[in-house]
Amino acid sequence: MAGGKGKRLSMIKPLLTVCGVPILKLIVDSLSPHIEVWIATTNGHPVERFVRNYLGMENFLIFTRGLGYEIDVIQVVETLGFPLITVPADSPFLTWRDIEHLIEECRSSLCSLKDNKGFTGISFWRDHGYSKYFQDVSIDHEILNVNDWNAFLQANKNC
């Protein structure tokens, strides 16, 4: 999920660089060896051009209506189907091991990953029962969420 309004940090948050690499590319590089990665964004958002020209993933773009994260996530799930992992474009240090843990521990229709600070926005959608059957899956470390300038600075200190 990349390319929203960016009210807390910046509209171009997925394109901000952490350790010299755009956050969105860090996430794609972490996940793409293991799963098919689609980028969800709003039509005309700067992320669209980045995905087409820099990542070369134009065939893996999905456009949402831009009605808010939760509504756009449901639109992506309904379009791509199950199973599906959704990841916001603000977790530059997300690892495949974190995603594997979420998948392995999930026993419900929808599982959300919680780190030692709380919800991460990362979810595993297994089937259509997500409106009734959901579960939190915890990990014992932080997945740094770059949602403000302090977190952005902290992320770059972690290089």
Image (spheres, rainbow, N blue to C red):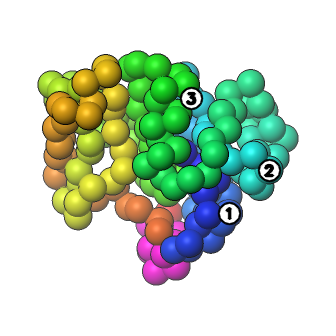
Quadrant hosting residue 55:
top right
For image coordinates 74% across by 24% down, the residue present is 59
Q: Residues within 10 Å of mark 2 (few under 14, many from 20)?
A: few
Q: Nearer the viewer, residue 150 or 7?
A: 7
Contact between marks 1 and 3 (CB within 8 A): the answer is no
Where residue 20 appears, x then y in whole percent? 65, 61
Whole-number angstrom distance, CA of label 3 to CA of label 2: 20 Å
Element assignment for label 1: loop
* Amino acid, disc 3: Val
143 w.r.t. 79: above or below: below
Where residue 104 appears, x then y in whole percent? 21, 25
Which one is earlier in the sequence, the residue at label 1 or at label 3?
A: 1
Location of mark 3 (residue): 37
127 w.r.t. 75: above or below: above
For image coordinates 36% across by 50% down, the residue present is 121
77 w.r.t. 51: above or below: above
Disc assigned to residue 44: 2
Most common secondary structure along the magenta stretch: helix
* Amino acid, disc 1: Ile
Quadrant hosting residue 29:
top right
Q: Does the magenta portion include 81?
A: no
Whole-number angstrom distance, CA of label 2 to CA of label 1: 12 Å
For image coordinates 67% across by 58% down, the residue present is 15
Report the magenta residues as a range: 148-158
Q: Nearer the viewer, residue 84 or 81?
A: 81
Quadrant into which the N terminus falls = top right
* Amino acid, disc 2: Gly
Element assignment for label 3: loop
Where residue 77 appears, x then y in whole percent? 46, 29
Which one is earlier in the sequence, the residue at label 2 or at label 1?
A: 1
Where residue 47 appears, x then y in whole percent? 72, 50
Location of mark 1 (residue): 12
